[in-house]
Amino acid sequence: MRLETRQNLADARVAAGEILGLAVGSWQEDRKTALAVERLLMIVGEAFARVRAAEPGVLNAIADAHKDIGLRNVLAHGYDDLDPVRIAAAVEESLPLLVADLESLVGNDGLA
């Protein structure tokens, strides 16, 4: 795995870990927290888009990586079409699996 790919995956791992720390309780009701979670989801999706461009096969080891890229595109370009249920599902259902996949690929040494 290229160093750049490993760094992108590590960036995604850090962002995902930060989301898990923020998305507790009624996090969607607090606008600043919801915006922070959305921004971090964009980072995850962008990191995966960069991995897809450099080493597409690596994404096969990450469940829902292509969905994360799609969510990033909606967050970045379709602000008027945001679905809070989709965002909550991504955070609450997919994110713990995503973190596990990323930890198996890049570990968690020094990562939040």
Image (cartoon, rainbow, N blue to C red):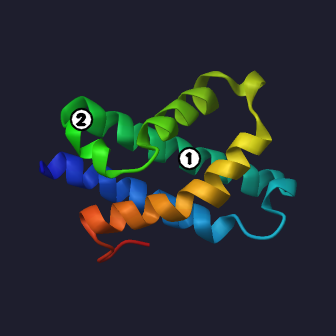
Residue carrying label 1: 41
Q: Is residue 65 above or below residue 80?
A: below
| Secondary structure of the residue carrying numbered label 1 | helix
Structural distance between the alpha carbons of marks 2 and 1: 20 Å
Q: At 45% across and 64% down in the image, what residue appears?
A: 99
Q: Residues within 10 Å of mark 2 (few under 14, many from 20)?
A: few
Query: Residue 73's quadrant in the figure?
Result: top right
Q: Nearer the viewer, residue 80 or 88?
A: 88
Number of marks in picture = 2
Measured from the top left, where is residue 24 in percent x and y? 73, 69
- Circles 2 and 1, Cβ within 8 Å, touching? The answer is no
What's the mark number on residue 56? Answer: 2
Q: Position of residue 92 (x, y in %)?
A: 66, 59
Q: Residue at x 67, y 66 (%)?
A: 22
Task: Find the residue positioned furthest to the bottom.
Answer: 109
Residue 3: percent from left, percent from top: 14, 52
Residue located 29% across and 34% down the image: 52
- Amino acid type assigned to the residue bearing label 1 in the image: Leu
Is 21 rendered above or below residue 73?
A: below
Mark 1 Cα shell of 10 Å, populated few (<14), some (14-19), many (≥20)? many
Identify the mark at residue 9; answer none if there is no mark. Answer: none
Query: Vertically, is 89 above or below 56?
Result: below
The residue under label 2 is which amino acid type?
Answer: Pro
In the picture, the quarter occupied by the C terminus is bottom left
Which quadrant of the view contains residue 26?
A: bottom right
Identified at 37% across, 43% down, the residue is 47
| Nearest to the observer: residue 92 or residue 72 | 92
* Mark 2 / mark 1, whichever is N-terminal: 1
Element type where label 2 sits in the image: helix
Q: Residue furthest right?
A: 29
Q: Position of residue 42 (x, y in %)?
A: 53, 41
